[in-house]
Image (spheres, coloured by chain):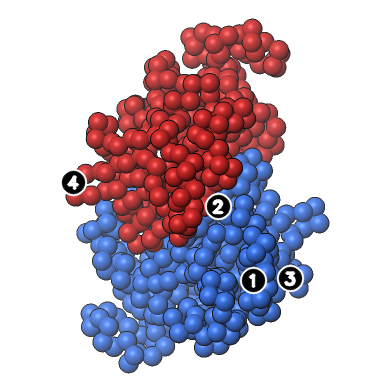
Chain colours: A blue, B red
Amino acid sequence: MSAIHVAILGFGTVGKGVYEIIRTNQERLTSLFGKEVKIVGVLVKNIEKHADYDKKLFITDNFEEIISLPNLDVVIEAMVGVEPSYTYLKQAIEKRCHAITANKFMFAHHGPELLELAKNFGTTVGYEATVGGGIPIIQTLNKLLNINQVFKIEGILNGTTNFILTKMREEGLSFTDALALAQQLGYAEADPTNDVEGFDAFYKMMILSQVCFGEQPDWKNVTRVGITEVTPEKIQQYEKENVRIKHIASLTKTDEGIEAVLKPVVVPPTDPLYHIEGVENAISVYGHIVGRICLSGPGAGMFPTASAIIEDLVHAYAKSPAIVTSA
Amino acid sequence: MSAIHVAILGFGTVGKGVYEIIRTNQERLTSLFGKEVKIVGVLVKNIEKHADYDKKLFITDNFEEIISLPNLDVVIEAMVGVEPSYTYLKQAIEKRCHAITANKFMFAHHGPELLELAKNFGTTVGYEATVGGGIPIIQTLNKLLNINQVFKIEGILNGTTNFILTKMREEGLSFTDALALAQQLGYAEADPTNDVEGFDAFYKMMILSQVCFGEQPDWKNVTRVGITEVTPEKIQQYEKENVRIKHIASLTKTDEGIEAVLKPVVVPPTDPLYHIEGVENAISVYGHIVGRICLSGPGAGMFPTASAIIEDLVHAYAKSPAIVTSA
């Protein structure tokens, strides 16, 4: 039986999640694709660190050894930073591999170029995992809403900040204490800037803008305010008024262009985002005919994010007869 | 320029919504399909009632005049009852038309037969509008969750009962008074049995079961309890305990088959369904890898339901080169 040959770039939480899903769902994958899915190589920074993970797995710290693997079909990238991720995926696409990425930072910078390149090489780029973890927001926007013109998107796109705000409200913690708790639970990193200052959500917004409006706003014109100035006193005051502070990314199409604002916003209980708690993410999509639809779910984590990657893998092959027939 | 020729069966709220969307979104439809979408005929019960709607529209009470229209491409059915809807759609499919339906009652009874027939005739059946109004739940289950095995679905599938329960809680109304209000606002019919006894939600459940599990449970084994026994006293009592009664349809795949239960259920604030208010619908989907994703939005109404129908129209042609290229 032939196989789909997959390489994974980056073997942190998400990369390992992809590996585990492929390992434990072979039967289902084989029935979906009509062939096996094989992980033929993993690119890591430090080989020794991963040497004992799976003795049969080919692990290397040299991308050349990955990209020169024979019959490579798919490159899944779960690294951080623009480079070398962008260069690696370009090379993969030029070798006519399908590219799948979870790297919002890189994709906000170079998504359009990668999609264009893939089009030219007759391959695809999957990026569902860059926004909203396991929530299928990208595919919903790209495939399910066609007649509907999306004129507004609002979302809680960062689970860490939402967790901090939730804990500050529920337990009256200060920002500093709530952040420490998030770090202790592994939801926030030692340097939390990326989350609490809104950089993570900012890049996700830019990707959503690209999907919905075909372009990104000028980054200089985007309002980006983090949650560090939010106090438990303010939160408790709002709670008494039956409203809540949520860290909301908002994109609106106007006659003048795209208005993009990320900041703490006061929302009433009639807003679905009011109810999103802890590390969950949610995205409200406003279509000109359907009105408001809201998708919520796990915005991060090993398996939700890896799940989005594997769903992208299925979509990459969705045009093949095997998948179309079984749909 | 060639055109897509569409007939509409039934010209109530949903049928008129379809007509209006097609009329007012011609430019967008033409750019999506690469050709115009034309409504070539509408089947009504009473011609006189609709005679003044649009003088240029071909309106008839005779299905034979619809099905014999030259170059008919798509038949959109927005009627009630199993027959003659089922027979009409069978005839449409046998004439190689795409069929799109909003009729949950008919589709719960005969969905699999219609899908099989369409497969044999190389055409498609769209039924997004049968469940959850404008929420793209059918397409999400059919197209976006492939590697994920859905093992449980829970939903608020009937906006009328959810509106009644919301008003009973918020305003302390009795069931009777809340129902009267729903009737006054046009959310409930003169005979409310279909909604308040759960028949409407039951049929939607059966359609969801078919999509998720490839089969329906034996209808005799499905628990179906309406909301007529819920009292404002019970609701207020639960409110004090920080839980709520919601009318929830639940489908679970077990080793013994499909467990299907529709009844008033007490849910905590951590459940996304707790927060769904008024005529909104919501569906929580539990995938074995991704975990719980929740979709919420307008569960009924002229434009949300018609929006789902027109999205189905796009999907029917999604395999054509024009659509694939523009995707």
Residue drawn at x 54%, y 28% is B188
Give the farthest residue toward the right.
A256
Q: For mark 3, does the 10 Å Cα neighbourhood hold few (<14), some (14 to 19), or many (20 or more) residues?
A: some
Q: Are marks 3 and 1 on the same chain?
A: yes
Which label sits in the foreground, 2 or 1?
1
Other residues around mark 1 within 10 Å, as few (<14) / some (14–19) / many (≥20)? many
Q: Is residue B260 above or below residue B61?
A: below
Q: Secondary structure at mark 2?
A: strand
Image: A66 above or below B206:
below
Look at the image and tell me in which quarter the C terminus of chain A lies.
top left
* Picture coordinates of residue B56, whole percent (x, y): 70, 15
Residue nearest the observer in this picture, B323 or A167: A167
Q: Is residue B62 visible?
A: yes
Q: Quadrant of residue B206?
A: top left
Question: Distance between the Cα atoms at labels 3 and 4?
Answer: 54 Å
For discs 4 and 1, the disc positioned in front in the rendered view: 1
Which residue lies under the disc numbered 2?
A: A294
As drawn, the label of residue A235 is: 1
Residue wearing tag 3 = A223
Q: Which secondary structure, mark 1? A: helix
Q: Which residue is mark 4?
A: B256
Residue A40 placement: quadrant: bottom left
Residue type indicated by callout 2: Cys
Spatial separation of the CA atoms under disc 2 and disc 3? 23 Å
**Residue A216 in which image quadrant:** bottom right
Label 2: chain?
Answer: A
Q: How would you rate the neighbour count of disc 4 (Cα within 10 Å): few for under 14, some for 14-19, many for 20 or more?
A: few
Residue at the spot 57% in from the left edge and 66% down from the top edge: A157
- Amino acid on which disc 4 is placed: Glu
Considering every residue shown, the one lying at the far left of the view is B256
